[in-house]
């Protein structure tokens, strides 16, 4: 997810902030949308400000841009609310990404304690609600002559309250869905809790989509579609990690490790790959250290006579043989690692690849299908 996101040159509370490409599309669109509905909004909410100066020339669209920016700042603060609460459970936030439908905080891992997910999830809507209150407080000091400022503050207030309410819809992956799942998990396995909340989420997504169709609201349709796709992925992920939890990395690895040494040439290693039907090797120095790795794709770019010591990539990362296979799954997906060296008491005893993991998944999910569901 978010392959086309770029990082902003600062951190918030130590957390990197990313802008997804879809955010750059939605921002001007939202500014335009707010600007074109400015007059309607002021009349409908009976604001005590003069409309005429605000709808002259490009003013509504400038105000729209300010309101849209304030909305996204609000979304970032909402995500920080999650991040600060997660920190109380020693869970670090890897990044916050702004995209098409708002913000998303990605955690390194989920808090392990039962019920913790509910606390982390509810912190977001509470933050938004508090921001709404803050806007209301600020509004008491904004003179109605400053119509533009008055509009932006009150718009931000409404949006934050809407954000708080919307996020409490009990559908995954929204905050309300996480609260529900976490509460269910108090009484049943995490997998079962995810499956039940996933079913509820799908029903809510379909209802929201139908409502969006009837109301001709493209945003609601998009959000419904997003919820449906995301909840399917979430349920799949829960099934994967549950299936894998009974394996250790040591069960899946290949051993002993077949490696190549740095003095070998590119064509020698490619010939070895063909002979042994392998796509990659770790590179091991004469002193027995793992100093790099080579893959068929990376070797094709070099001259046949070159020593691989000169063209190899960084060595694979390590994982302990005792780690659970679900930890391996997280590490491979998160860091996009294709192979990891398996370590046992400082010694390398094997290597584990994405293929090993996928094979274990296939076997485990096949077995799951024939196993009666326990709760
Ligand atoms: Zn949230």
Image (tube, rainbow, N blue to C red):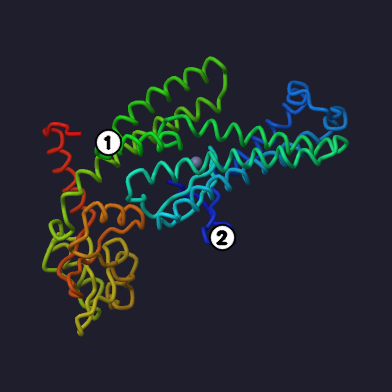
Does the Cβ of the disc 2 residue fall within 8 Å of ligand 1?
Answer: no
Relative image position of residue 204 (x, y in whole percent): 42, 24
Residue at which label 2 appears:
11
Relative image position of residue 101 (x, y in whole percent): 53, 37
Residue at which label 1 appears:
187
Depth check: give the residue in front, 298 or 237. Answer: 237
Secondary structure beneath disc 1? loop
Depth check: give the residue in front, 246 or 168. Answer: 168
Does the Cβ of the disc 1 residue fall within 8 Å of ligand 1?
Answer: no
Dot 1 or dot 2, earlier in sequence: 2
Farthest-out residue, bottom: 287
124 displayed left or right of 33: left
Q: Are marks 1 and 2 in contact (CB under 8 Å)?
A: no
Bin the neighbour count of mark 2 within 10 Å (Cα to Cα): few under 14, some 14-19, many 20 and up: few
Give the Cα separation between the discs numbered 1 and 2. 38 Å
195 displayed left or right of 3: left
Q: What residue sits 13% from the left and 31% below the top? A: 372
Q: What residue sits 40% from the left and 38% below the top? A: 178
Give the quarter of the image for residue 174.
top left
Give the quarter of the image for residue 351.
bottom left
Relative image position of residue 291 (x, y in whole percent): 28, 76
In this rendering, is residue 165 above or below 142? above
Depth check: give the residue in front, 27 or 10. Answer: 10
Q: Nearer the viewer, mark 1 or mark 2?
A: 1
Total marks placed: 2
Q: What residue sits 38% from the left and 22% below the top? A: 203
Q: Quadrant of the C terminus?
A: top left
């Amino acid at each position: 997810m978010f392959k086309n996101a770029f990082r902003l040159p600062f951190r918030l509370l130590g957390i990197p902030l990313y802008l997804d490409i879809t955010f750059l599309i939605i921002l001007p669109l939202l500014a335009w949308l707010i600007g074109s509905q400015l007059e309607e909004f002021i009349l409908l909410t009976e604001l005590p400000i003069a409309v005429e100066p605000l709808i002259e020339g490009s003013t509504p669209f400038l105000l729209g841009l300010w309101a849209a920016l304030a909305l996204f700042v609000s979304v970032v603060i909402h995500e920080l609310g999650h991040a600060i609460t997660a920190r109380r459970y020693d869970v670090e936030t890897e990044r916050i990404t702004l995209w098409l439908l708002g913000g998303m905080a990605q955690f390194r891992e989920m808090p392990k304690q039962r019920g913790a997910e509910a606390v982390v999830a509810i912190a977001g809507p509470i933050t938004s609600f508090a921001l709404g209150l803050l806007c209301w407080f600020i509004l008491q000091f904004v003179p109605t002559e400053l119509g533009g400022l008055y509009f932006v503050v009150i718009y931000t207030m409404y949006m934050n309250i809407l954000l708080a309410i919307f996020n409490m819809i009990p559908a995954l992956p929204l905050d309300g869905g996480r609260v529900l799942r976490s509460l269910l998990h108090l009484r049943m396995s995490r997998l079962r809790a995810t499956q039940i909340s996933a079913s509820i989420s799908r029903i809510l997504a379909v209802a929201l989509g139908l409502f969006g169709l009837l109301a001709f609201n493209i945003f609601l349709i998009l959000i419904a579609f997003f919820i449906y796709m995301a909840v399917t992925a979430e349920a799949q992920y829960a099934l994967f990690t549950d299936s894998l939890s009974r394996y250790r990395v040591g069960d899946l690895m290949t051993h002993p490790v077949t490696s190549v040494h740095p003095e070998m040439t590119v064509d020698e290693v490619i010939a070895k790959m063909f002979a042994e039907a392998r796509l990659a090797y770790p590179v091991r120095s004469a002193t027995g250290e793992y100093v790099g790795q080579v893959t068929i794709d990376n070797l094709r770019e070099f001259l046949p006579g070159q020593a691989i010591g000169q063209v190899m990539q960084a060595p694979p990362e390590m994982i302990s043989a005792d780690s659970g296979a679900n930890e391996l799954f997280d590490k491979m997906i998160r860091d996009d690692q294709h192979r990891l060296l398996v370590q046992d008491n400082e010694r390398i005893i094997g290597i584990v690849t994405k293929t090993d993991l996928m094979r274990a998944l296939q076997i485990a999910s096949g077995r799951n299908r024939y196993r009666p569901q326990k709760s």
